[in-house]
Amino acid sequence: MSQPKDHGKPGRPKMAVFKFASCDGCQLSILNLEDDLLALGQALDIAYFPEASSDMREGPYDIALVEGSITTPEDARRILSVRKQAPLLITIGACATAGGIQALRNWGDVEAFKRVVYPSPQYIQSLSTSTPISEHVRVDFELWGCPIDKEQLLRVITDLLAGVQPRLPTHSVCIECKRRGNVCVMVAKGIPCLGPVTRTGCGAICPSMGRDCYGCFGPAEGAHEGPGLPPNTASLAKEFHQGLQLIPIEVLRRFRGINGSVRPFREESQAWEQKDRAG
Amino acid sequence: MATPCDTHVAAVPKTFLQQLIDVLCAKGYRVVGPALRDGAVMWDTIRQVSDLPIGWRDEQEPGRYRLENTGSDQIFGVVHGPQSVKPLAFAPREPLLVIERTKGSFSALPTLPKSEKVAVLGARACDLAGLAIQDHIFLKDAYRDPYYQTRRDGLFLIAVNCTRALATCFCASMDTGPRASAAFDLALTELEEVFLVEAGSAAGQAMMSALSLAPASTARVREAEQQIEACARSQVRRLDRSPLPQALYDAHEHPRWDDVAARCLACGNCTMVCPTCFCHVVEEVPDLTQTRSEHTRLWDSCFTQEHGYIHGKNIRPTIKDRYRMWLTHKLASWIDQFGTSGCVGCGRCITWCPVGIDLTEELPALLKPSSQAKEKPGQA
Ligand code: SF4
Ligand code: SF4
Ligand code: SF4
Ligand code: SF4
């Protein structure tokens, strides 16, 4: 650290952090970087981060971090302009990457929600769905998690600064759970854990605290269309039902959570919705 | 290998165990034994006999592990937990090297673990057989892994011969148990009132001499023999190794692989708990300032996407490919590679598989002629 470095000089990559429909938890994870936040501020020029600073400079930027999902017509337009302002767009967190918990609305009646919640619902401009950023614009890299893991964020930024293609493991939470020396809650306690089909990245926090993984890092490996294997949710769901005696609606709810609208989890919850309806 | 013989086997009252722990501590060992944690037993530091799971026993079946308190005063009633001895020698996460940038150059800082004397109290026969296989992998000839070696050299192994088999055990058919036969320093057999103690190494012998233990009567030795043999006979699972490895190679296109792939989650738990699986991945963890980077080895598994990735292509894209890789390596190609089976019959992969996939059920199904195997429409 005593080394003179070029990071402090002008010419540092300019970074912006944008917020869409979200709880701000992922942005808080950036602010929670503590010592690393200073290093981040030296390595990058944090030009636009309203959550952190009122010094907001205009684009273009080199890297845009995007938190939140698209839930309003205005946001659907705004994300197009964000995309134009940065050659690298990275989504941070379950909302931006997968639609978030608010994507539960995709199975509901948004007009009815508005009437229940607001005295004058006609003023609310809202889409009937919550969708991930990748359904609107090209995304260069996705960080999963609710919230994101700060080590993963640092890792991706470090790789980008070094000119290396960022790459994060896509395997199950179970592998990290075993490396940490946890006792499996599913096998030893019969708790329905989503770890076997969930992407690693959190450090197996929940099983380390003796509870089940609820899938906040999204499906392992082939989460979206494209290369990679979608996780075998059908087999795990069957085990929840037959082995652990969950009734269909409980199986449905396991999969329809924070990442419920990502294809592998969405399709699994829908299969159990049908079983639930069939009674 | 220690064989029971009256003159070498001692019989000691149960209170001996505390004495043994104290002597080991006095000699600078950290004693590690099974301790109750989160519904299983895990290796932990043992200072008192009461730190051990006295009166508890484990019941294991595919995908299920439960402990129950029987109220007995048996000390080693729990056969095993998810951990074999593996993590004590082959660490799940081990920094191999730290690179630091210096002016115009860099320095590489070694990260060899501190050598620590660890006495493992309560290793089972299958654990020791697994450790012997890992020794062969990590310490062979010129290619010695110094990290593994440092940890391994510090181990003093106190085996406990099994007198009760779990429903998932099949060591008898793998010739690895229930009596400890692979390298150990001391082996205990817990009988109703006494422990029988025998030495398996010079260090173990020295320990026995230092404690001046009374020899066991022939009747005691026979009693222990009978209990161990009864344990072997009681095993409900077995694995017929006679047609291996060839039969499994011949089964490469068997339709049963599709059936098991439909159940398998590719979660990797089976490989993590296996005492012999040695696969690892090396990760580079640089810091943001680009002045320091840690080169870390992590346990890996053939069930991950990354494991099957070679330049430009994933050679094991499907769960079927991965399960087949796993089982074929364990039971067949391991024999060609290392001269032994990669399975020691501990049953951990059966218990700790979240969906209870059982290799002792899969192997016979895979070796049945595929015309007899369940035909399924639309399979390639
Ligand atoms: S507790 Fe959950 S994440 Fe951990 S091994 Fe068990 S199923 Fe996997
Ligand atoms: S079975 Fe798989 S994880 Fe285990 S040693 Fe073989 S290739 Fe590695
Ligand atoms: S393959 Fe399974 S039964 Fe065999 S040694 Fe490994 S974990 Fe134990
Ligand atoms: S066999 Fe079981 S433990 Fe192994 S990867 Fe498949 S589901 Fe996981």
Image (cartoon, coloured by chain):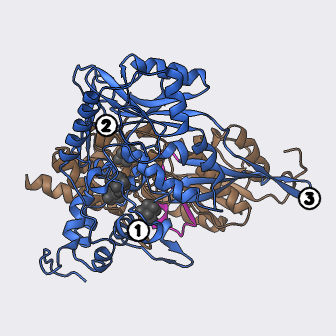
Cα separation, mark 1 vs mark 2, equals 27 Å
Circle 2 chain: B
Q: Which chain is blue?
A: B
Picture coordinates of residue B302, whole percent (x, y): 44, 64
* Residue at x-position 44% and y-position 45%: A177
The kind of secondary structure element at disc 1 is: helix
> Viewed as shown, does residue B219 lie left or right of B24?
left
Q: In which quarter of the image is the N terminus of chain A?
A: top right
Q: Return the residue at label 2.
A: B79
> Viewed as shown, does residue B136 lie left or right of B7?
right
Could you tell which of marks 2 and 3 lies nearer the N-terminus? 2
Could you tell which of marks 3 and 1 lies nearer the N-terminus? 3
- Residue placed most toward the observer, B17 or A55: B17
Q: Which range is magenta?
A: A132-148
Which label sits on residue A80?
A: none
Which label sits on residue B335?
A: 1
Q: Return the residue at label 3.
A: B104
Circle 1 chain: B
Disc 2 packing (10 Å; few <14; some 14–19; many ≥20): many
Same chain for mark 2 and mark 3? The answer is yes
Picture coordinates of residue B21, whole percent (x, y): 49, 22
Most prominent secondary structure in the magenta stretch?
loop
Question: Which amino acid, by three-letter code, is at mark 1?
Answer: Ile
Cα separation, mark 3 vs mark 1, equals 49 Å
Question: Which amino acid, by three-letter code, is at mark 2?
Answer: Val
Circle 3 chain: B
Outermost residue toward the top in this view: B15
Q: Which chain is brown?
A: A
* Residue at x-position 68% and y-position 38%: B114
Question: Which amino acid, by three-letter code, is at mark 3?
Answer: Gly
* Residue at x-position 32% and y-position 47%: B177
